[in-house]
């Protein structure tokens, strides 16, 4: 209403409230209490396994799942494990060929809580840990028939979490002198990284201010015949997410459509294909839905820039 906004996200019987008017929050809470049985626990400090801390002097907010990780390490007997520095073993390519092939191997895996562990990791990856999104996405591919090699990859990831248990998502205002645009997006893709079907893996992250607000790593559903195609598909997924987030915040009353959001990617050919399709006849076979990315560039709702890959 006007410049005053109230946002009330609810999950089953847990909820929180946010507003730029404390008076209106108090009035709404009183109104809800007259209709429902509820408890006011004060400023949100813990919600759905996520700890919320604030540094009001620097206007920063932090999200962490430290206790969730500690509980998970204890559940899977890794509380005292030796920490590792990477989510996956460098160069490791998991495949279905590593799944059990004999009755003895299947029987050996029956006592191993692979599905349960991957489910726990999936919740963590979607909550506050984008750094493990790719590793968890790979592990999810083998839940129907996991093998010992897949379980060792889960253990490797647990050891990585042991050493990074205190990592947090940090949100705060953008540094002075940076672009005033609301979203900054990054996309990337490998090429034919899945040894089972030749599909590539897309990844993206969207950032508001200093913190990531949306991220994903997923196996592409079609086979890309070049790195340009793989990167183009990843950029399409990212652009769709940017538009969805813009529409969501627009419903909240924020003016997010007045300027384009920047999408960073590290493939100049894919960027050129998006901006100048007349020079890229080799992309004509791409499914029509991916041409949405070109249209978005033409309509200036997305701006593409090159992002150098860092090794």
Image (spheres, helix red, strand yellow):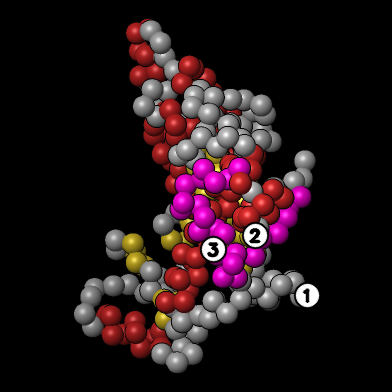
Q: Which residue extends farthest bottom?
A: 2
Q: Is residue 22 above or below residue 73?
A: below
Residue 311 image offset from top left, x and y in percent? 77, 41
Label 2 SS: helix
- Residue at which label 1 appears: 177
Toward the viewer: 101 or 263?
263
Residue 106's image quarter?
Answer: top left
Q: CA distance from mark 1 to mark 3?
A: 30 Å
Residue 183 image offset from top left, x and y in percent? 60, 67
Residue 41 image offset from top left, x and y in percent? 40, 71
Which numbered circle lies on residue 275?
2
Identify the residue at image location x=57%, y=59%: 294
**Precedes in sequence: disc 1 or disc 2:** 1
Q: Which stretch did the figure color magenta?
A: 282-308
Which numbered circle lies on residue 295?
3
Decide if residue 93 is in sight here: yes
Quarter the N terminus occupies? bottom left
**Precedes in sequence: disc 2 or disc 3:** 2
Q: Residues within 10 Å of mark 2 (few under 14, many from 20)?
A: some
Q: CA distance from mark 2 to mark 3?
A: 9 Å
């Amino acid at each position: 209403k006007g410049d005053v906004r109230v946002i009330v996200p609810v999950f089953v019987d847990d909820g929180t409230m946010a507003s730029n008017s404390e008076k209106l929050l108090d009035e709404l809470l009183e109104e809800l209490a007259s209709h429902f049985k509820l408890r006011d626990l004060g400023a949100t400090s813990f919600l759905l396994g996520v700890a919320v801390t604030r540094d009001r002097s620097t206007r920063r907010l932090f999200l962490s799942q430290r206790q969730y990780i500690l509980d998970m390490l204890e559940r899977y007997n890794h509380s005292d494990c030796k920490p590792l520095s990477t989510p996956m073993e460098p160069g490791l390519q998991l495949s279905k060929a590593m799944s059990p092939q004999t009755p003895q191997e299947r029987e050996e895996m029956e006592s191993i809580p692979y599905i349960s562990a991957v489910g726990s990791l999936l919740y963590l990856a979607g909550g506050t840990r984008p750094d493990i999104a790719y590793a968890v996405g790979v592990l999810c591919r083998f839940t129907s028939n996991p093998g010992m090699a897949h379980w060792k990859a889960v253990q490797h990831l647990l050891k990585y979490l042991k050493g990074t248990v205190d990592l947090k998502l940090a949100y705060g205002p953008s540094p002075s002198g940076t672009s005033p645009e609301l979203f900054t997006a990054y996309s990337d893709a490998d090429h034919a990284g899945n040894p089972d079907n030749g599909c590539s893996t897309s990844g993206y992250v969207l950032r508001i201010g200093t913190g990531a607000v949306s991220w994903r790593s997923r196996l592409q559903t079609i086979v890309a015949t070049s790195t340009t195609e793989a990167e183009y598909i990843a950029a399409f997924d990212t652009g769709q997410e940017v538009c969805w987030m813009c529409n969501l915040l627009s419903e909240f009353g924020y003016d997010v459509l007045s300027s384009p959001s920047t999408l960073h990617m590290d493939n100049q050919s894919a960027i050129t294909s998006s901006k100048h399709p007349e020079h890229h006849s080799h992309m004509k076979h791409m499914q029509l839905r991916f041409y949405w990315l070109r249209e978005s560039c033409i309509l200036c709702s997305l701006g593409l820039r090159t992002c150098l890959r860092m090794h």
